[in-house]
Image: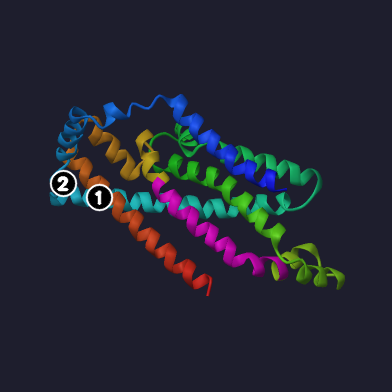
Amino acid sequence: MRLSTAAVPLGLLALVVASFWSLDLQWAAFLGTDALAGMGRFAASFFPPETAPAYLAKTGWALLETLAMSAVGTALAVVGGLLLALPAAGSGVPRAAARLVLNVLRSVPELVWAVLLLILAGLGPLPGTLALALHTSGVLGRLFAESFENAPPLPALALRQRGVGALRVWLFATLPQTLPQLASYTLYRWENNIRAASVLGVVGAGGLGQMLSYHLGLFQMREACTVLVAMMMLVALVDTLSWRLRQRLTR
């Protein structure tokens, strides 16, 4: 038993060492004087940020668009995740089919979903929102299913013994026990979707990411810096809001 317990960290350590050995990381070139000087010049080109009122208004609108994309995408994912989590937490063929769908949804990155949906819906926030919804449905569906499976079984068993139907058992026994955990998972994925929505704009899915890609492509670094500051402010705002909500849910 002790040997098998020690084998896991030793195997992980060996994997890390082998990874460093196989990647051929050029630390000397990365930390060289010329590289650091070039990095400093490039970083200095971002300052000062662009603060023209018209541009700040445009950035603010893109920030709201990114926030809306993440919120709508997460809301759709909650619905899709719940619909898939219920059979995934069951047994038999429905369980296997639902698990397969969840694996497919979360295995495909948001960026790939966005590229596929851009062909159908064109440029704009719609393909980005749907891409977030599809990928996040797979993630939340798996997490929701595990929450349902790990819920204490006695309340549900008591209701079933009284002849209560499966749907009412889930509504009045399983869901109330798992609701704080489901809400926590949802808020955490919303935080992640804020960052993902910013990245999806790079492929033309709207929001701050699309502005960032445009200005970096034209080497307009001051404008790009303003967009980056807006991204950081949005992530910090959502992180703080999500943390406060999770704190209240766990009281």
Q: In x, y percent, where is residue 238?
A: 38, 59
Disc 2 residue type (three-letter): Pro
Which secondary structure, mark 2?
loop
* Residue 29 seen by the camera: yes
Q: Is residue 185 left or right of residue 1?
A: left
Quick one: 54 or 178, which is closer to the camera? 178
User: To which residue does mark 2 refer?
Assistant: 49
Which residue shows up at 62% across the image and 42% down it? 8
Discs 1, 2 touching: Cβ within 8 Å: yes
* Visible residue check, residue 116: no
Q: Main secondary structure of the magenta part?
A: helix
Q: Quadrant of residue 196?
A: top left
CA–CA distance in space, label 1 to label 2: 9 Å
* Magenta residues (range): 173-195
Q: Earlier in the sequence, mark 1 or mark 2?
A: 2
Q: For residue 204, what is the image quadrant?
A: top left
Can you say whether 150 is above or below 251 in the image?
A: above
- Residue 146, which numbered label? none
**Residue 192 in the figure: left or right of residue 165:** left
Apparent side of residue 29 relative to residue 188 in the rendered image (left or right): left
Q: Nearer the viewer, residue 86 or 192?
A: 192
| Residue 68 vertical placement versus 19 (above, below) | below
> Picture coordinates of residue 148 (x, y %)?
69, 59
Q: Which mark is residue 229?
A: 1
Mark 1 element type: helix
Position of residue 7 relative to residue 73, above or below, is above
Up the image or down, 211 lies above or below 156; here it is above
Q: Position of residue 203 (x, y in %)?
A: 38, 33
Task: State yes or no: residue 147 in magenta.
Answer: no
User: How dense is the environment of label 1, judged by Cα within 10 Å: few (below 14), some, or many (20 and up)?
Assistant: few
Does residue 185 show up magenta in the picture? Answer: yes
